[in-house]
Every structure is written in structure tokens, then in C-alpha cells.
Image (cartoon, rainbow, N blue to C red):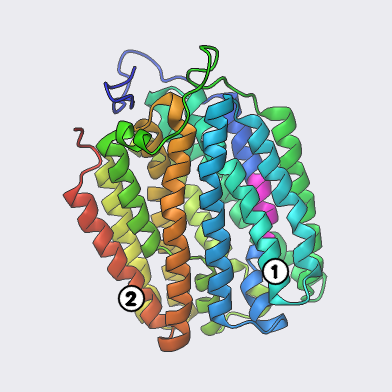
Amino acid sequence: MQDADGAEPESRPNAAGPRPAIPRTVWALGLVSMFMDISSEMIHALLPLFLTGTLGASVAMVGLIEGVGESTAQIAKVFSGYLSDRFGRRKPLILLGYGLGTASKPFFALAGAPAMVFAARFADRVGKGIRGAPRDALVADVTPPEIRGRAYGLRQALDTVGAFVGPLLAVALMALFADDMRAVFWVALVPGALAVLCVVLGVEDRSVGTVGTGRPPPVRIADLRSLGRPFLVVVAIGVVFTLARFSEAFLVLKAHDEGLPLALAPFVLVAMNVVYSLGAYPAGAWSDQAPPERLLLSGLAVLVAADLTLAFVPGLWGAFLGIGLWGAHMALTQGLLAKLVAQNAPAALRGSAFGLFNLATGLATLAASLAAGLLWDISGARATFIAGAVFALLASALVITFNPSRKS
């Protein structure tokens, strides 16, 4: 059932009987995400130090590569989301995106200059952009509204298992290969190939919205108006969240500055993602029961605490405390934002809604990562994390002012 503007009403707990089971396709998409994250994080955990140590890049260059890469992924979701609505199928674009991500992996190992890493990161993130919006829309397509928070929480939890298994493998392989980062990058091909295989064998497609009634509706600027105020509020909140939360590459650099050895650098993402993975499903279940603003404000409070800890608490223990709080913030907010996009978009435009949301947050990602890198080079790590805390407080004010539960 949908509201008059096409968005689904806010779900309520089902008191009449047992909750539906999470669909098989959601589990399959979670496993796909897990394997691809193992592959990507084996590289990403080492990439900032590979760029600055092996290839001689500046921290500002790291920020540029991260910002352009992540914003490219988000912007590409606009087009893939539209195409999945237009043609009524999600799986072909999901498969193409994961295939491109896997194909980019050898170029990290072959890179002899920052420009080649830039190109490989760009291709990898284009793949992420192609698969992202159709995948998130497919989760909503196959999942009843009353358990959608759990479904997104489960997919995010499995994704994040990969995000800490990948760095752990990177640590073990760095020991095995005597700190040869290029050898680790080559091994990252294997879980990427497994992710592609899981898409082929495990993901079932679902016809979208109006497919079968003739021509699917084209996405126009006017469709933003039909999505309505609640969707636009979610977009605005997502943008300010992104400005407050720059790339995790800066967490790796912070821990290294506090004395973490090169071979142990992947433990930064292990620590963050263990907390993230353990918290994602409970946070998703909470989002099926509680008003969304409660989770958003809780997540922002934790992010402020993380930034202030990273800015002012010295030593490795302080760095890892801040990193753990960062992971808790991600668990509280990331699945919830996806649920809010799905909840406030018509089914026939769901892929496009995810794409438009990610276009806005992608541009914010580019700005946030560039600013964080420049601020770090000019004023140091403390100024970078203080700026993140300030934007988190601004996001809190936005949530309080424009309550995402409020309908109009």
C-alpha cells in the first residue's frame, strides 16, 4: 500500500502474527556484497600507505583519489537506477557492476604511479555505482515493508563482515609476502570472482513497478516533485551526513601517525568494521520499531564523539577508540538511510530515487574528502576531525528541524 504521493507509509510492527522471513535474494545479495568487500578492502586497507609510501603521493592526492572515486560511484548510481526502472530489471546491471569491480583489481597491483591508481580506483567505483542503486532497489522490491529495516541491516551486516575479513586477510598476506603490497592486491582477485559467481547463481530478479503495462515512466526533473517532501528531506540529511563523514582512508592515516606499523595498518578497518557489522542488524531491527529521527540523532551523537576522540585523545588507544565509535555510527545510520529512501519513493521510481539520493551524497563525498585532505595538509589531523564534528552537529540540527517522520 502507498500514500497518495506514491511513497509507502511508515511501517509498523506486525502484532497479528509472525514476521515474514527475509527473502533468499536478500541473503544472496549480502553474500555478494561480502565477497566483493573482502576483495576491495584487501586493497583499500593498504592503498593510502601504498600511495604515500610506495608511489610518493601527498595526503591531498589521497583525498582527491578517494573523493573522485567515491563521488563517481554515487553519480553513476543515477544512471543505473534510472535504467533499472526503465527496463524493469535489476540483475543485469548488478552483474555488470560487480564484474567491472573485479576486472579493475589487477591494475592496482600493476600501478607504477598515482595516475594509474586513480584510473583503477575510478573504474572500480564506476562498477560500484552501476550495481549500487539497482541492488538497493531490489532489496526493497523483494522485501515486505514491515521487515525492510532488518533486510537492509542484514545486507549491510554481511557487507561489513567482508569489510573486516578483507583487512585481516591483508594483514596475514602482508606477513606471508614480506610486506609486498602488490602481491596482496593480486590475491584480491579471488573473492571478487566469487562475488560475480554469487550474482549469477544466487540473485533472482523481480519485475519493477509498471513493467508489463506498456512503457515504464521516464525519469524527469518533475519526478522530484512527485517524490515529495519526505524524500527531499532524506536527501538533505544524507548530504550533510556525508560532509560530516569523509573517507575512512583518513582513519588509516591517523592510526599510522600515532605509531601503527605499516603491516598492521589494515587493523584500522578491521576494528571499524567489526563494530559496524555487529551493530548493523540490531540497528536495522530497531529502525523497524522506532522513529527514524531517534536513530539518526543517536548515530550523529556517536559520530561527534568519534571525531572528538580522534582529535583530542592521543596515542593508538585513543585512535582505536575513535575508530570503534566511527563504526558504531555507521551501524546506526547507513541501513536506516537506505530504508528511508525506499520508504519515501514510489515502487516504479525506486531505482531512480536511490540514484538521485546518491548523486547528491556523491557530490558531497567529493567535497568532504578534498576538504579533509587539504585541511590535513595545512593544519593537521586535529583540524580535520574537528571539522567533521562541526558538520555532524549541523546534521543533528537538520534532523531536528526537518523530522524525517513528518509527512506533508
Above-or-below relation of 142 to 61? above
Q: Does residue 35 appear to the left or right of 389 in the view shown?
A: right
The reply to whether residue 85 is visible in this rendering is: yes
**C-alpha gap between disc 2 and disc 1:** 29 Å
**N-terminal-most mark, 2 or 1:** 1
> What percent of the width, then of the height, locates residue 321?
43, 69
Quarter of the picture containing the C terminus is: top left
Pointer 1: residues within 10 angstroms few (<14), some, or many (20+)?
Answer: many
Identify residue type, mark 1. Answer: Val
> What percent of the width, then of the height, locates residue 290?
27, 37
Residue at x 64% of width, y 64% of height:
44
Residue 386 vs residue 218, the one in the foreground: 218
The residue singled out by tag 2 in the image is 386
Pointer 2: residues within 10 angstroms few (<14), some, or many (20+)?
Answer: some
Contact between labelled residues 1 and 2, with CB atoms less than 8 Å apart:
no
The magenta span reads: 34-42
Residue at x 41% of width, y 20% of height:
19
Residue 210 part of the magenta segment: no
Quarter of the picture containing the N terminus is: top left
Identify residue type, mark 2. Answer: Ile
Q: Nearer the viewer, mark 2 or mark 1?
A: 1
The reply to whether residue 289 is visible in this rendering is: no
Secondary structure, magenta segment, majority class: helix
The local secondary structure at tag 2 comes to: helix
The residue singled out by tag 1 in the image is 117
Q: Does residue 399 appear to the left or right of 106 in the view shown?
A: left
Residue 5 vs residue 44, the one in the foreground: 5
